[in-house]
Amino acid sequence: MNDDISLWRLFFRIVERGSLSRAAEDLNLEPSSVSRRLSALEKRVEVRLLNRSTRMVTLTDAGSRAYEQMKPLVAEMEGVLADLDSRSPKIAGVIRMTAPVNFGERFLTKWLTAFQRRHPQVLIDLVLSDHRIDLKAEAMDLAMRVGELPTTDLVARRIGEMPNVLCASRGYIALHGMPSTPEDLVSHRAILYSLGRERNRTRLKMSKQGREVSVELNGVFHLNNVGAIEQAVSDGAGIHPGPRWLFNEGIASGALIELLPDWSLMALPVHLLRLEARYEPKRVRALGDWIAQCWSNELVNH
């Protein structure tokens, strides 16, 4: 019976990871060992559960039925293991995570370094990308996402929100004038963040004492990198609504000017995402807690 449960747990891990090699990495096994155990399970139930290829696996009809029918039993077993894991002080293993490029460079890398000082047996594989990586396809344990989330079957944990500020360089204001109302922004040149989908105009929502307005920005310079946007703003290419943490230093030094400071820009929610699974490894849970704490300590009210 114990062997049966172990084999079914292996089957579930392969399905959730999408390949034998990723499941093997999770379980600290050789891929050949995972393949043998899967074959043993299929021999025991006398039916093929998965179609294999060099890069991925897919469920057969029988495998799909087995996956759905075995969920309650495997979920109960994973719950028992999670309880046992929570009683152990050891935090170790590999964590794969993805996050936006510039935020990862500015903050996340140092947070992860501090986490590893506390837990030296944890190995971290950080992938920085401004594109939304498929967690299952890329075998990611965690993803940091900024902005509203689309409908998803991922498990989301909100860790905070990212305040935004509208600013421009002193040189730009000297040439184009200072806007005094949100409506004035329409005539200004705007620098906009884009991954290739948005073009020309972006609506900016602002509020003041309960009044909300939405204005269109005239996007004349689209960039797909936050660091490049920071440089373009400093160079006087236009106005930009972006993360306050990115421009605080420039505003404090006087090189940049906050525009319409009595108006508030909508803050963006920030989430940590993980795959829907019954068992969240202790190392992943610990890292999520650490990032949430670092966010609260360093970025709240910034």
Image (cartoon, helix red, strand yellow):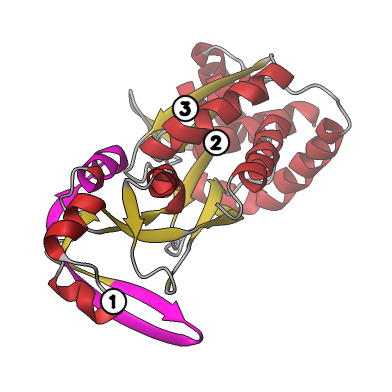
- 1 or 2: mark nearer the eye: 1
Residue that protrudes farthest toward the right in the picture = 87
**Residue 178 % position (x, y):** 24, 68
Amino acid bearing label 1: Ser
The mark nearer the N terminus, 1 or 2, is 2
Res 166 seen here: yes
Q: Nearer the viewer, residue 139 or 63?
A: 139
Residue occupied by mark 3? 126
Rendered position, 2 above or below 145: above
Rendered position, 262 above or below 6: below
Q: Nearer the viewer, residue 15 or 218?
A: 218
Kindly state the secondary structure of the residue where label 1 is placed: loop
Residue occupied by mark 1? 180
The mark nearer the N terminus, 3 or 2, is 3
Amino acid bearing label 3: Leu
Q: Is residue 31 magenta?
A: no
Question: Splitting the image into 4 quarters, where does residue 87 fall?
Answer: top right
**Residue 230 % position (x, y):** 29, 43
> Alpha carbon of mark 1 to alpha carbon of mark 2: how far?
46 Å
Residue occupied by mark 2? 141
Kindly state the secondary structure of the residue where label 2 is placed: loop
The mark nearer the N terminus, 1 or 3, is 3
Amino acid bearing label 2: Asp
Q: Is residue 219 magenta?
A: yes
- The N terminus: image quadrant: top right
Q: Range of the magenta residues?
A: 204-233
